[in-house]
Amino acid sequence: MNEPITYRHWVMDALPKAAPALATSTVLILGRIWNTNGAEHSVGNAALMTVLATGAAAAGAFASAGRAGDRTIAGTAFATSGGLVLAAVSGYADGISLPLLLWVLATAVAYGLAARYWRTDRRDAVAYERRIGEKREDHVHIERVETIRGRTQIEVAREGTAYAEALAQALTARATLPGFDPAALTRAGLPELPTATTHKEY
């Protein structure tokens, strides 16, 4: 059966590419809102965000250490730590220059990390499509071979049936000729022809 063709909207295709910028922009906006609500030059808030960012970075370091490290957890922890740092600077700083600088750096780092995952996903998708294509080609080849084999068997059966009918007609016509002796054929070494009997069920 033919698989249905589906078309994705361009927004769905562009959303994963815009996710890092949206995330860092959201953190920057929230940090500036926090700045206007009393976080500017607040030592307590800055200390709290520093402790949280350090804890998230330590969690990422522990998650990535050793052979049994989980890359997903480590990446999430480091991203959380970077977001907390960006939020802390956005909330504590006087002007917008330093928060914007950190926003640009954070966005660049986010896109750099995301690009690695996008390449891996694209490589896996291409490999999967290649395997599916190879399996589909194998199935198509097997179907073609079986179709050819079936047609050949049908043709052979038809030719055998036609040959048997022609032979039966020839023998019937030969038997009607005067002087035909079936025993003479048997004595000459030809196999004895079976007599066809028909049973009629009532």
Image (cartoon, rainbow, N blue to C red):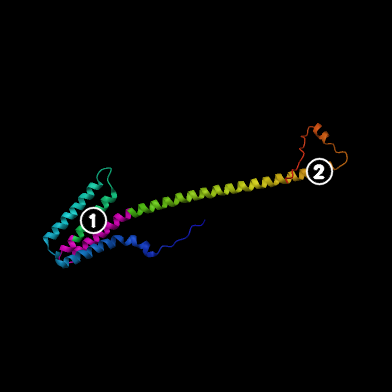
Residue 128: image location, x then y, percent? 42, 51
Toward the front, the furthest residue is 202
Q: Is residue 37 left or right of residue 193?
A: left
Q: Which mark is residue 172?
A: 2
Give above or below for 7 relative to 117. Answer: below
Q: Is residue 40 left or right of residue 115?
A: left
Residue 26: image location, x then y, percent? 25, 63
Q: Which region shows up in magenta?
A: 88-116
Question: Looking at the picture, which amino acid does disc 2 mark?
Answer: Thr
Using a 10 Å C-alpha cutoff, classify the residue at mark 1 as few (fewer than 14 neighbours), some (14 to 19) or many (20 or more): some
Secondary structure that dominates the magenta span: helix
Mark 1 or mark 2: whose residue is earlier in sequence:
1
Quadrant housing residue 201? top right
Q: Callout 2: helix, strand or loop?
A: helix
Give yes or no for residue 103 being in the magenta stretch.
Answer: yes
Toward the bottom, the furthest residue is 36
Question: Looking at the picture, which amino acid does disc 1 mark?
Answer: Thr
Q: Report, in whole angstroms, how far the alpha carbon at label 1 lies from the one at label 2.
A: 96 Å
Residue at 39% from the left image edge and 64% from the top image edge: 10
Q: Which residue position holds label 1?
A: 80
